[in-house]
């Protein structure tokens, strides 16, 4: 893979029967940035994340991460290598407290070995790490309440905390603001940026709100019918005529780019 990149896909392809969901995609992701994937419903964004994280095997092509070929590694192996991902279906335990949810995630997903059960010291470390994450996502006051009592925006913060618990190097966030009230979106977006900066993390983001995408992203890849339609900085994407006619113009006629 090319130097200077953290993730690279080569001719990555996923077929579901006759349908080509991801069609020979070549994407390079630089470290320590927010790299968004946009595109209309059905463009293949979620499938692409599934291929990166090892949640689905590709039909063809390769995925490289940190110089290593991870194409056929399953989800738990890519997680241990530092790729954390969210799912559109939430994996919160509603009757456990916020703290317990985070602690479980620390124990289950942490990089390194699994021998923590034997060691009281390790247990303490998990507790401390859990509080650190709870601070980071701003859920200290609610930490000892059952997760089900959180409002929608709080649940999204908890999901972010569950991913962060494993201290991943890469976060794959698939529509983290979906279903949120508009006025709660900026806070979550600020949090994502803060987390990315503070931890030198690389965030890959699928997000439908174009104003959010344009303001938060360092780089954008536009997908359309499984293929890469365009890539560039937010300004380049907003000015791209192919993107405008195929996508932004129709779907986001009200887009404001500053
Ligand atoms: N497990 C699956 N089995 C069959 N078809 C699928 C599966 N997952 C996704 N698809 C199809 O692949 C295409 C891309 O879907 P998806 O990756 O979810 O797009 P996006 O996330 O961009 O909306 C869609 O046509 C979708 O119906
Ligand atoms: Mg999707």
Image (spheres, helix red, strand yellow):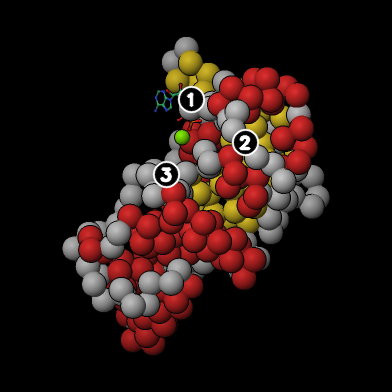
Horizontal side of 184 relative to 254 (left or right) equals left
Q: CA distance from mark 3 to mark 2?
A: 18 Å
At 48% across and 36% down in the image, what residue appears? 46
Horizontal side of 176 relative to 82 (left or right) equals left
x and y percent of residue 207 in the render? 53, 42
At 22% across and 67% down in the image, what residue appears? 146
Q: Nearer the viewer, mark 1 or mark 2?
A: 2
In this view, the residue in front, 125 or 243, is 243
In terms of sequence position, does the residue under pointer 3 or pointer 2 come before the other? 3
x and y percent of residue 69 in the render? 64, 44
Q: Secondary structure at mark 3?
A: loop
In this view, the residue in front, 89 or 8, is 89
Q: Quadrant of residue 234?
A: top right
Please tell me the numbered disc located at residue 255: 2
In terms of sequence position, does the residue under pointer 1 or pointer 2 come before the other? 1
Q: Secondary structure at mark 2?
A: loop
Horizontal side of 89 relative to 20 (left or right) equals left
**Quarter of the image where the N terminus is located:** top right
Q: Does label 1 point to a residue whose CB lies under 8 Å from ligand 1?
A: yes
Q: Is residue 16 above or below residue 211?
A: above
x and y percent of residue 222 in the render? 65, 32
At 48% across and 27% down in the image, what residue appears? 41
x and y percent of residue 193 in the render? 59, 61
Residue at image mark 1 = 42
Residue at image mark 3 = 178
View extreme (left): residue:
95
Q: CA distance from mark 1 to mark 2?
A: 21 Å
Res. 227 visible in picture? no
Q: Is residue 235 above or below residue 154?
A: above
Q: Nearer the viewer, mark 1 or mark 3?
A: 3
Q: Secondary structure at mark 1?
A: loop
């Amino acid at each position: 893979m090319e130097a200077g990149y953290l993730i690279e896909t080569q001719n990555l392809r996923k077929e579901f029967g006759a349908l080509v969901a991801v069609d020979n995609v070549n994407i390079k992701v630089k470290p320590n940035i927010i790299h968004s994937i946009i595109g209309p419903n059905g463009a293949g964004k979620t499938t692409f994340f599934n291929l990166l994280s090892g949640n689905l095997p590709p039909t063809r092509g390769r995925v490289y991460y940190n110089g290593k070929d991870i194409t056929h590694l399953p989800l738990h192996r890519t997680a241990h290598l530092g790729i954390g991902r969210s799912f559109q279906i939430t994996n919160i335990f509603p009757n456990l407290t916020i703290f317990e949810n985070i602690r479980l995630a620390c124990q289950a997903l942490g990089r390194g070995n699994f021998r923590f059960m034997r060691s009281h010291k390790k247990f303490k470390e998990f507790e401390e790490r859990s509080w650190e994450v709870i601070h980071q996502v701003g859920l200290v006051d609610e930490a000892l309440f059952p997760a089900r009592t959180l409002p929608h925006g709080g649940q999204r913060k908890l999901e972010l905390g569950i991913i962060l618990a494993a201290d991943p190097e890469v976060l794959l966030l698939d529509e983290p603001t979906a279903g949120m009230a508009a006025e709660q979106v900026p806070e979550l977006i600020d949090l994502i940026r803060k987390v990315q900066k503070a931890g030198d993390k690389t965030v890959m983001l699928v997000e439908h709100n174009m104003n959010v995408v344009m303001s938060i992203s360092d780089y954008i890849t536009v997908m359309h019918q499984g293929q890469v339609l365009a890539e560039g900085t937010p300004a380049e994407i907003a000015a791209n005529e192919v993107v405008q006619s195929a996508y932004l113009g129709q779907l986001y006629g009200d887009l404001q780019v500053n």
